[in-house]
Amino acid sequence: GIQVEQSPPDLILQEGANSTLRCNFPDSVNNLQWFHQNPWGQLINLFYIPSGTKQNGRLSATTVATERYSLLYISSSQTTDSGVYFCAVGRTSYDKVIFGPGTSLSVIP
Amino acid sequence: EAQVTQNPRYLITVTGKKLTVTCSQNMNHEYMSWYRQDPGLGLRQIYYSMNVEVTDKGDVPEGYKVSRKEKRNFPLILESPSPNQTSLYFCASSPTRLNNSPLHFGNGTRLTVT
């Protein structure tokens, strides 16, 4: 089956630090999205980013579709950034969406 | 407020007792989908629907049924729940089937089958 990889699997940051999360995806999929699952279990869509770069406040994401990877940048991390970050990919017709295994982030004061 | 609403948030039931988890969206989205999340296995797609009266299996459809009789609702039905269906379930929707817009998730339903 289609495998989406994320790294690192776990990350602990001091509040205020920056971090980069990576998602690798195979040739057969595209239309990458990043999600944050907060400690209460809610899944929030951060970016829909099939290619290029987007920024939203302290978060930004870059997808290099030709090289099959995406990066999520978190700057000046806050404790509220804690949770699990997932990337997800799908085929153009959106019939199947496949999630990566996630990066578990803990931001400590 | 634009949202995807799932009910109930928590459900404890016994093996074999039919149950339905409801999902409703108020954004006139064409695409709706169900996922289950399990430790170590991540999020896996159960069923999806491209539009009214159009549904199809995802990666783990066994033991589940769905229906899409109207655009806003996409209930998940467990005819005879079993303990291996204990999981955290999410419903999601998206404006179109063309995958050019983000998925919006409900708040999840934590199901325990004893």
Image (cartoon, coloured by chain):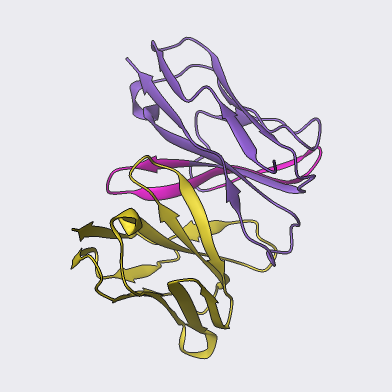
Chain colours: A yellow, B purple
User: Image quarter for residue A19?
Assistant: bottom left
* Residue B108 percent location from the top left of the image: 48, 35
Position of B3 with respect to A59 (left or right) is right
User: Residue B42 in magenta?
Assistant: yes
Q: Magenta residues, as a range?
A: B36-58
Is B20 situated left or right of A83 in this image? right
At 76% from the left and 45% from the top, the residue drawn is: B27
**Residue at image point 48% right, 9% down:** B17
A76 and A1: which is toward the camera: A76
Give the residue drawn at x 77%, y 48%. B30
A72 vs B70, left or right, is left
> Would you place residue A28 above or below residue A66 in this image?
above
Depicted A70 relative to depicted B96: above or below: below
Q: Residue at x 69, y 41 (%)?
A: B1
Quarter of the image where the C terminus of chain A is located: bottom left
Q: Is residue B50 magenta?
A: yes
Q: Quadrant of the N terminus of chain A?
A: bottom left
Horizontal and vertical percent for residue A18?
28, 76
- Which residue is nearer to you in this view: B28 or B21? B28
Task: Answer yes or no: is residue A26 visible.
Answer: no
